[in-house]
Amino acid sequence: MGHVVDDDAIIRLIKELVETPSPSGNTGEVIGFVEDWFENRNVKTQRTHKGALLATIEGMDQEQHRFLTA
């Protein structure tokens, strides 16, 4: 059984993200938004000493890692 994609939820999320102020050097508000979004879905997060957010999504193979930055 595959995942069901909720197009409307994706559009709402993207809309909230792009409407959240996040000028270079002042991204605390949008990072907080993303952090809350992940934590509400039981995804472990942590902030780096420079204020970036790391989210860990567990997979089937803990030996294979992927990193996404944006």
Image (cartoon, rainbow, N blue to C red):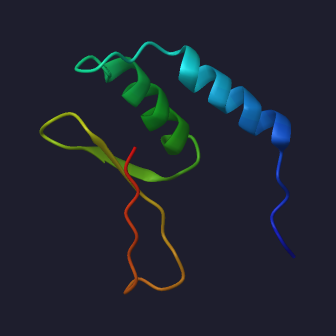
Residue 63 falls in which quadrant of the image? bottom left
Q: Nearer the viewer, residue 19 or 35?
A: 19
33 vs 47: above or below? above
| Image coordinates for residue 6, horizontal then vertical, percent | 83, 45
Q: Quadrant of the C terminus?
A: top left
51 vs 21: above or below? below
Residue 2 falls in which quadrant of the image? bottom right
| Image coordinates for residue 29, horizontal then vertical, percent | 38, 18
* Residue ID at (54%, 82%): 60
Q: Quadrant of the N terminus?
A: bottom right
Residue 19 falls in which quadrant of the image? top right
* Residue ID at (66%, 23%): 15
Q: Nearer the viewer, residue 23 or 28?
A: 23
* Residue ID at (38%, 30%): 31
Q: Is residue 2 left or right of residue 67?
A: right
| Image coordinates for residue 28, horizontal then vertical, percent | 31, 21
Task: Report the number of discs.
Answer: 0
* Residue ID at (27%, 16%): 26
Q: Is residue 53 left or right of residue 20?
A: left
> Seen from this angle, which residue lies furthest left?
49
Q: Is residue 4 left or right of residue 66?
A: right
| Image coordinates for residue 4, horizontal then vertical, percent | 85, 58
